[in-house]
Amino acid sequence: MLVCKYVQNTSHPREAAVNSGGTPQMTDDEENVDHRRAQERTEARGRAPVSAQSLARRLDKTIVLVGLMGAGKSCIGKRLAANLGLPFVDADREIEAAAGGCSISDIFALHGEKVFRDGERRVIQRLLGNPVHVLATGGGAFMDPSTRALVKERGLSIWLKAELEQLLKRIGRRNDRPLLRDVDPRQKLSELIEARYPTYAEADLTVESADGPPDVTVQRVLRALEAKLNGNMRP
């Protein structure tokens, strides 16, 4: 039987319708998606890229990405880190390493969510003590009051906000989400959106996760960072 050495190890440092004529007719949702994608393509073409390296030199806190599963935290985080010339760290992967290679799903199954969150907090606390980097966190990390306080104190948090349809499309590519086991994904995600979005909104920055090329979202994050560092954020 697989046994995870999770509780003991999480604090340890680790080396790095068709119309009447027979023509398909778009629904309102499809039209909205099509319009949004067109806007994103225009956005990607119409704005000069932010000078990421100059932003990186001004950062004095780790960038902490928060949001629901499927929002693109790892995907965007890797690209953002590459643009900024900073290390990228995935908190979930660090948690699994601290558990001796045990997967997040196995940790949930063997120890339960409470034990997982306790270990997650310790791992994130350790990571936030490292030099400035880009940190992707799990969907529930920012919901924990103690973890959220740590992030607010030591990090610069960015909520990658995504719509339900985006999340559903993205999570369909993976089957290792503990909170989606044996449940209807649409219903569960809708419940999580209602429960978590008000708390995610406490992040320092909110960036809409584009339903298109990841680099569109990366540029949005960079522009938000630039505005924040320049003191131009709207209240």
Image (spheres, grey):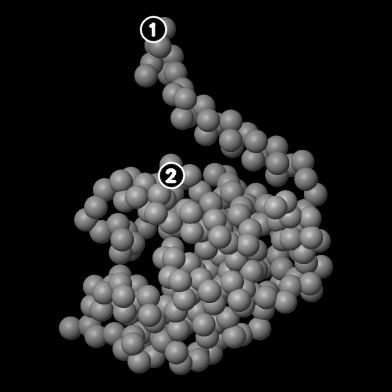
* Relative vertical location of residue 214 with respect to residue 124 in this rendering, above or below: above
Residue 42 location (% of width, % of height): 70, 37
Is residue 213 left or right of 222 when viewed as pictured?
Answer: left
Does label 1 or label 2 sit earlier along the sequence? 1
Q: Which residue is mark 1?
A: 20
Q: What separation in Å lies between label 1 and label 2 (alpha carbons)? A: 31 Å
| Amino acid carrying mark 1 in the image | Ser
Quadrant hosting residue 117: bottom left
Residue drawn at x 64%, y 69% as measured from the top left? 156
Q: Residues within 10 Å of mark 2 (few under 14, many from 20)?
A: some
Residue 136 location (% of width, % of height): 53, 68
Q: Which of the two marks, 1 or 2, is nearer to us in this view? A: 2
Give me the disc on residue 182: none
Residue drawn at x 59%, y 49% as measured from the top left? 208
| Amino acid carrying mark 2 in the image | Leu
Q: Nearer the viewer, residue 2 or 153?
A: 153
Q: Which residue is mark 2?
A: 164
In the rendered view of the protein, which quadrant contains the N terminus?
bottom left
Secondary-structure class at tag 1 = loop
